[in-house]
Amino acid sequence: MDTYINIYEMKKATSILLFIFFCNLSFGQGGQKIDVDSLLNELKKGKNDSARVDVLRELSEFYRFQNPDSSLLMIQQALDLAIKTRYQHGEIKSLFTKGKIFVSLGNYPMALDLYLQSLALSERIKSPVWIGINSNYIGELYTYENDYINALKYYNNAISIAKKNKFYSIEATAYYNITRIYENKNELDSAKAYGLKSMKTILLAKDVYMIARVYNTLGSISFKTAEINKAMEYYRNSLFYSKDVDDNFSYCVANLGIAKIFQSRGQIDSSLYYARQSLYISKKIGFMKQVIDASSFLSDHFKMRGMYDSALAIKEIYIEAKDSLISQDKIAGFQRVSFEDQLKRKEMEQDRIKYRNSIKTSILFIGLAGLLTLAFILWRNIRIKQKANMLLFAQKLEIDGQKAKVEESLKELTLTQAQLIQSEKMASLGELTAGIAHEIQNPLNFVNNFSEVSTELVDEMNDEIEKGNIEVAAQIGQDLKQNLVKINHHGKRAGDIVKGMLQHSRTSSGQKEPTDINALADEYLRLAYHGLRAKDKSFNATMKTDFDESIGIINVISQDLGRVILNLITNAFYVVNEKKNQNPEGYEPTVTVKTLKNPAMRDKGAKVLISVTDNGNGIPQKVLDKIFQPFFTTKPTGQGTGLGLSLSYDIVKAHGGELKVATKEGEGTEFTILLPITNS
């Protein structure tokens, strides 16, 4: 094998790179579109060895039928790199793909050896999906050789693995292959049972490409067991699904099956229609086996009706397809000889050619024939290239149109995102409204009370002045001044609260400003608490604070950071209230807000920590990774937008900080904001 690869490395390395470079956009097997340029760009970037292995394997898979030599060289490079870098999953996939290439070449012994290597490594690293895939493909090789005992052993192994891990596609494929074995052995009851199992599992896997083939197999089995109506139903279902996914092979098989059913019913015209459909499509696509079946059916049909000219014409199609298939079988039979035997045969053939060439005198004739052949190949390649260029140009136009649509969709998405963010901000403002009203009421009460007292003091002062008690009047004036100072203080306090509310509702300016973090956290703690109390009079919770006074003033975007703190505190109050409703006895809902300067951490630089802790039910591990995703919420429908934590995460990141979460189910959760202290 190493000798084989080295030969191709010497001969093909340069030509492969040029061949791939001029392919702008290609198609994979089964109509799947493969962007070769994207794969080549990934290969050039070389971000990591694992990515290079995967890209080389995808390219090799694509060129498996178009250029097997190039495909072999690329998969060997992928395999060598996977082994070198100990990328075991890449090694498994590379061995598997290499096996598929040798199947395409008809070298089944080499393919079997590679599949077995891939299976052994899959079992060693406990990769159930690749154990199942390799088992199915090994079973197919044994099926090709009519070794049904070994084939069934590997199919059953694939089924066992697939059932444990709910790999429905792998399980359905194994059932389908077993169905074909039992049908070939004419054990029709067993074949039907496995066919129905395959169909049931394929529907779970939603594998539309397999559905049509299974329906065809069930139709064939039902026809053989004289369940004609059931067979017709299966074949018609196959027509529907195969046409839907452009599976021409299944479409041809289904048409011929329906033709046989109509023939058995004596409906000659319908039978002819479907048989001709099968022959036309199979001949057009090049399905020789199906051409033989359809032409044989039509030829016999015309003979029975005495239409000998039509029968003869169809017979010619049959003979041509038969000759082609026999040639293919001979080639495949030769290729199934072991790899070492092929090399020996090649050497012997070369010796014979040298001997014949030494005694031949018609060198000029051979050279001329070679030149004519080369000219024909060049002409054909030019034609193919012209067609490919036209196809690529059409594809480019289509891609440009799709690009314009994507850009327009992106603009709409950006606008929608901005609107959703503003909606989330207004939703949080709604949470604050009742708390703000409560906070404003306190200073207003002071203003009203001191105003009334000051009015009385003015009257008293006027009375003392009239009596001539100037000293007493002066003392009353001092009291009046103190009252006015307090009125001014509480008036400013109410103004600050209103200012904060307006800042919260406006779009952020993005400018950092000196901010008292402790005051900011304390204000939003009280606003959130009073807001929830206003909405639900039964709500109650213990609020604890632990503020580090050494933090002082730091530069942040205060309204953005305030939204983050408000969101975390509101969530904390929500979860403790939920737990209180579930456990009314012996539970005291508590929310703690803490600040700390320069917490003990490994990274350098001055830091400020803000934490919000609750003693609620905690966050389940299964959703912990999703909580910062947009639109994800654990609240009932209508009680949360799912944007709060996502926006909070983005705001903290924009400050150069981190937002972390620590939780324990049944005990509570702590959200931690860690911000760098900057001078600007």
Image (cartoon, grey):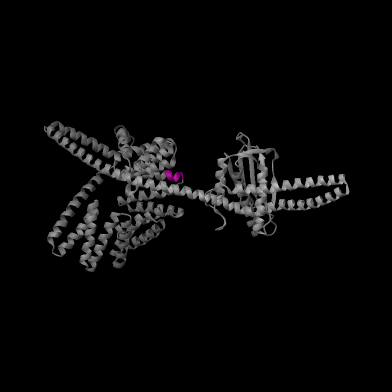
> In this orientation, which residue lies closer to the viewer: 119 or 505?
505
Q: Which residue lies furthest to the front in this view?
A: 466
Horizontal relation, residue 533 to residue 450: left or right:
left
Chain part drawn in magenta = 121-125
Please tell me whether the stretch drawn in magenta is mainly helix, strand or loop: helix
Residue at image position (65%, 42%) is 517
Magenta stretch encompasses residue 526: no
Seen in the image, is 366 located left or right of residue 132?
A: left
Residue 98 in view (yes/no): no
Closer-to-camera residue (636/84): 636
Residue 591's x, y, as percent? Answer: 67, 50
Q: Position of residue 293 (x, y in %)?
A: 22, 57
Residue situated in front as seen by the camera: 567 or 219: 567
**Where does the image place residue 641, in percent across and percent down from the top left?**
54, 53
Q: Magenta stretch containing residue 123, yes or no?
A: yes
Q: Residue at x 30, y 54 (%)?
A: 247
Residue nearer the viewer, 541 or 68: 541
For the N terminus, give its image quadrant.
top left
User: Residue 209's x, y, as percent?
Assistant: 34, 54
Q: Quadrant of the C terminus?
A: top right
Image label count: 0
Residue 83 appears anywhere in the view: yes
- The reply, left or right, for residue 164 in relation to residue 554 is left
In the depicted structure, whether residue 208 falls above or below residue 395: below
